[in-house]
């Protein structure tokens, strides 16, 4: 596998155009949800992680700092053609490392039920029943990872 480059970037970083294409293609387009122009990335509580391989953005996640030692992981996206190759694991491990660097004690996320096993393998615990996502209606569960 070629080396991955993981970068925490700002909302105006040129790589974000490709990251926006990726997250729409992976998270919304398959369900007929139109593309949005505002991802909420410019909010001061949001941290953006872009993963690239050979100059191509192949992964993305956002970390939303909430205070009280907690943060939400959102919009985890891995390009379809590299899923299952370690990109998602590398992405999530860097998110967790950043949370620890910031002294956070808990991460949480809303995961598609089809991704629940992936997050379980990373140590996340399901803490809710199944519920539909707001934009897609796809079944999700709430999961969390204690960091302390």
Image (cartoon, rainbow, N blue to C red):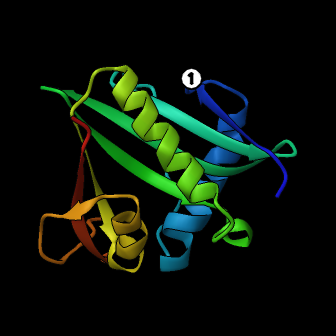
Q: Is residue 11 above or below residue 118?
A: above
Q: Is residue 73 left or right of residue 23?
A: left
Residue, x 54% and y 56% (percent of image)?
89
Q: Residue tagged by mark 1?
A: 10
Q: Is residue 14 left or right of residue 54?
A: left
Q: Is residue 116 above or below residue 15?
A: below
Whether residue 85 is visible here, answered yes or no, is: yes
Kindly indicate the quadrant of the structure image that contains residue 54. top right
* CA neighbours of label 1 inside 10 A, class few (<14), some (14 to 19), many (20+): some
Whether residue 135 is visible here, answered yes or no, is: no
**Residue 97 appears at what percent x and percent y?**
44, 33
**Residue 2 appears at what percent x and percent y?**
85, 52
Q: Which SS class for mark 1? A: loop
Q: Is residue 35 above or below residue 63?
A: below
**Residue 116 appears at what percent x and percent y?**
35, 73
Q: Is residue 120 left or right of residue 37?
A: left
**Residue 80 appears at what percent x and percent y?**
67, 71
Where is the N terminus found, in terms of image quarters? bottom right
Residue that lies at the very extreme toward the front in this rendered image = 148
Q: Is residue 32 left or right of residue 96?
A: right
Kindly indicate the quadrant of the structure image that contains residue 67. top left
Residue, x 12% and y 68% (percent of image)?
128
Residue in the foreground of this view, choosing between 37 and 130: 130
Where is the C terminus found, in terms of image quarters? top left
Residue, x 26% and y 65% (percent of image)?
134
Residue, x 64% and y 46% (percent of image)?
19
Residue in the foreground of this view, choosing between 30 and 74: 74
Q: Count the marks: how many?
A: 1
Kindly indicate the quadrant of the structure image that contains residue 147. top left
């Amino acid at each position: 596998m070629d080396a991955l480059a993981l970068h925490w970037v700002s909302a105006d970083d040129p790589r974000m155009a490709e990251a926006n294409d990726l997250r729409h293609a992976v998270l919304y387009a398959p369900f007929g949800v139109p593309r949005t122009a505002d991802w909420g990335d410019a909010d001061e509580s949001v941290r953006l992680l872009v993963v690239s391989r050979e100059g191509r953005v192949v992964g993305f996640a956002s970390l939303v700092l909430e205070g009280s030692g907690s943060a939400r992981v959102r919009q985890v996206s891995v390009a379809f053609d590299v899923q299952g190759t370690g990109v998602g694991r590398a992405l999530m491990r860097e998110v967790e490392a950043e949370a620890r660097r910031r002294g956070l004690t808990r991460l949480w996320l809303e995961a598609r039920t089809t991704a629940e096993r992936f997050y379980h393998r990373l140590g996340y615990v399901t803490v809710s029943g199944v519920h539909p996502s707001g934009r897609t209606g796809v079944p999700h569960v709430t999961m969390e990872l204690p960091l302390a």
